[in-house]
Amino acid sequence: QFNSLITGVSPQSKLLSVRVADKDRGVFYQDMADGIVWAATNKVKIINASIGVPQEISLAELLACQIKYSERDQPCDIKQAIKTLCYAVDIATQKGSLVVAAAGNDNINEKNYPAACDKEGAIAVGGTELFNDQRWTQVDGKHGSNFGDWASIAAPARAIISTMPLEILEVPSSERTCIDSVGIGAYDCKTGTSQAAPHVSGALAQILVRHPEWLKNKDLMDDAKRRLMVSA
């Protein structure tokens, strides 16, 4: 719970934040992979990755990446990035953790990693509209949930209430998208598969709240994942 106004999907669960982004919100794939492995090593059982690397990048994105990460080793090699991220997911899985990751927001049938790593390792979460099960898409068509047979499951992605106070973001009232009710209007909304993924992480956490004995058994952890997939 947050300030007694907002309750998450699994309020009984403990959260651990692992920082992988820099001060400008830029994320280097090796840092992302290190964060996944660090969490699993420290016995985090459900690792939510509302972040990712696309299967392909444009020339403009490649040049921007090379400038930003010029001092890093192989900074913009997409194949190396995917290999590194999926190896991190494999390590986390071997340690008994479940990795849940956002499918991406490019409104195309294109993989996003680590979401698209082997389905036995990661759960790829697509996004739906808020009040129905239709795939989330923006009116302009430029943004929306990525999709494809590699995606595992979907959850609400549009206008999800966050715990970020609007006064911190200095968002004018005319631009607020949250439903203004019982104080909820004081918090910002976010849209995208980064918001969908935590719904799935929370649902998994709820299963484990009911069956805490499963936490010490990798096979039972996998069973928790299967139960969620077949019942969603």
Image: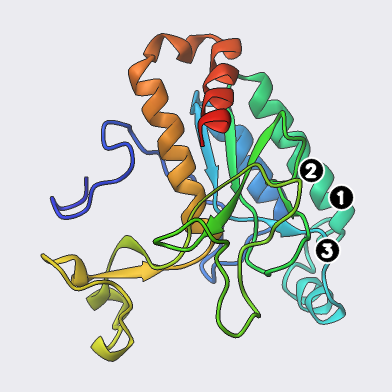
Colour scheme of the rendered structure: rainbow
Element carrying mark 1: helix
Q: Residue at x 53, y 24 (%)?
A: 227
Assign the N terminus to one quadrant of the image. Answer: top left
Residue that appears at 30% across and 81% down: 176
Q: Position of residue 38 (x, y in %)?
A: 58, 34
- The label number, if any, that marks residue 76 in the structure image: 3
Whether 125 is drawn above or below 157: the answer is above
**Quick one: 189 or 37, which is closer to the camera?**
189
Are circles 2 and 1 on residues that touch, CB within 8 Å? yes
What amino acid type should be assigned to the residue bearing mark 3? Cys
Q: Amino acid at mark 1?
A: Gln
Q: Give the residue at mark 2.
A: 84
Task: Answer above or below: position of 217 versus 178.
Answer: above
Instruction: For marks 2 and 1, give the CA distance.
Output: 6 Å
Labelled disc at residue 80: 1
Counting from the top left corner in percent of width and height, residue 65 is at 77, 72
Tell me the kind of residue under disc 2: Thr
Query: SS class of the residue under badge 2?
Result: helix
Image-based side of 1 in relation to 143, left or right: left
